[in-house]
Image (cartoon, rainbow, N blue to C red):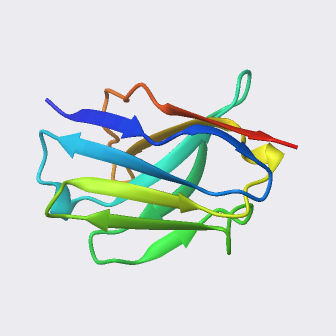
Amino acid sequence: QVQLAESGGGLVQAGGSLRLSCAVSGIIFSLKAMAWYRQTPGKQRELVATMTNGGSRIYADSVKGRFTISRDNAKNTVYLQMNNLKTEDTAVYYCNTRDLPPFASWGQGTQVTVSS
């Protein structure tokens, strides 16, 4: 059974930085494309960043140049470095695979709140 555990969120002022982590278990992590998503109340979950098993990175336009996705296959962990945070980045952040189908079970997410 796949388990996802996000951490690293918090309250930060606009312009600040945070580094999110997502520990994954129950799969052969190195074979999976991994992604970060975010969701705010009343809105659909939004794809933020993807990293393939080959190391390619894809970002939503809203975070390009500010966020960096990375992974450590030895630790079964995917990271999201978030710099120059904006108030509109406030959301609950989740990780999951970008492959189809996605993992049925999502983690609890980690709350990121950016104050002005």
Instruction: Please determine whether, in this image, residue 113 is positioned above or below residue 62.
Output: above
| Quarter the N terminus occupies | top left
Instruction: Please determine whether, in this image, residue 41 is positioned above or below residue 56.
Output: above
Instruction: Please determine whether, in this image, residue 87 is positioned above or below residue 49.
Output: above
Q: Is residue 84 left or right of residue 71?
A: right
Instruction: Name which residue lies at 59% across and 54% down.
Output: 48
| Quarter the C terminus occupies | top right
Question: Which percent across, then down, holds residue 12?
Answer: 70, 44
Q: In the depicted view, which residue is nearer to us: 50 or 63?
A: 63
Instruction: Name which residue lies at 39% across and 38% down.
Output: 6
Q: In the depicted view, which residue is nearer to us: 9 or 55?
A: 9
Question: Which percent across, then down, holds residue 92?
Answer: 59, 33
Which quadrant of the figure has residue 25?
Answer: top left
Which quadrant of the figure has residue 66?
Answer: bottom right
Which quadrant of the figure has residue 29?
Answer: bottom left
Question: Which percent across, then down, holds residue 71?
Answer: 32, 64
Instruction: Name which residue lies at 32% across and 35% down.
Output: 5
